[in-house]
Image (cartoon, rainbow, N blue to C red):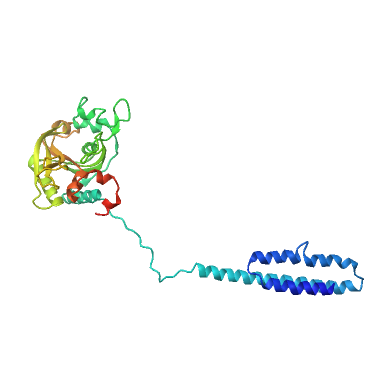
Amino acid sequence: MKQQLEAIRTSALEAIAATKSADELDALRVKYLGKKGELTSVLKMMGKLSAEERPIIGQVANEVRAKLEDAIEAQSAALAEAALAQKLRDEALDVTVPGTPVRVGHKHPMYVALDELKEIFVGMGFTVLDGPEVELAELNFDRLNAEEGHPSRDWSDTFYFDADSRVMLRSQTSPMQVRAMDTMDLPIRIIAPGRVFRKDEVDATHSPMFHQVEGMVIDKGVTMADLKGTLNLVMEQLYGKGTVTRFRPHHFPFTEPSCEMDVQCHKCGGAGCPTCKGEGWIEVLGAGMIHPKVLKMAGIDTEVYSGWAFGMGLERMAMRRFKISDLRLIFENDIRFLEQF
């Protein structure tokens, strides 16, 4: 039996030293030291030994078990250290390798135009206001002198939320002008940019969702000449000295007298093309002197104060600013188009 124990020790120590993984090592532990292991099987035969042989064989067996346990523990530590070293090698970071380039975005062309407009107007002493996109018809129409029956209030033109046509997606940012008249001290100089919604068919210059920048000035002695001079200056700062504009008589319930302002088509230079629908001009805004009735509804004395207002389409301003031929390009999110700016 002593020879069996020595043979187990020799073969086990060699096998343990040759293991390459923790799984192999655990398998050897079970093979030699488990309940049905080789060493355990030999020890079960000790009952057949004489009283004189048992202490001797027992001592040898304990020495063999201790040797195997020590060898397994040492090999386990060695394998763990080797695995850690390999992991460090595999996951090593080479700081000399160039990093992955990070693509940095930039402003959308429409918002470039908006920021330029804000800068121009703020430089003139205007305050920038922001407001809700879900609006009351009272502020969107009634307080702007667009009474019941006005074409712009029809369901075919406006997105309503209720059957009574009182809650809607705003069709203009003009309600912010009403809010300004109700809450701000005179004189007032404000612009109100934001998204608006109308049931327009999509084409090169129209969209059911677009952006507006509306503005208003109320002060003593304000005239139509102030309106024209301010807007011409804004267009020249946006598009350059000598930008060609024109004002045409028009009608808006909010203003009286009213006008529309056009800039010469950037695509054809006034000759006529699909972008300007052959007219040579692109309408950029509507404007006029604020109707006295609107001022009175806000409690403003029309004998002392007068004002003017305008509303421009931001997309059209961006089209003119960057010579974009089709408004739909602004909304399609084609990276090939956006990268040009």
Please identify the quadrant where the C terminus is shown: bottom left
Q: Does residue 276 lie above or below 168 as drawn?
A: below
| Residue displayed at 28% across by 44% down | 331
- Seen from the viewer's position, the closer of residues 287 and 278 is 278
| Residue displayed at 74% across by 65% down | 31
Q: Does residue 145 lie above or below 82 as drawn?
A: above
Please identify the quadrant where the N terminus is shown: bottom right
Residue 279 figure quarter: top left
Counting from the top left corner in percent of width and height, residue 308 is at 13, 39
- Is 27 left or right of 149, judged from the image as shown? right
Counting from the top left corner in percent of width and height, residue 112 is at 23, 51
Counting from the top left corner in percent of width and height, residue 299 is at 18, 33
Is residue 89 something that shows in the picture? yes
- Is 116 left or right of 245, judged from the image as shown? right
Counting from the top left corner in percent of width and height, residue 170 is at 27, 35
| Residue displayed at 75% across by 67% down | 32
Is residue 221 something that shows in the picture? no
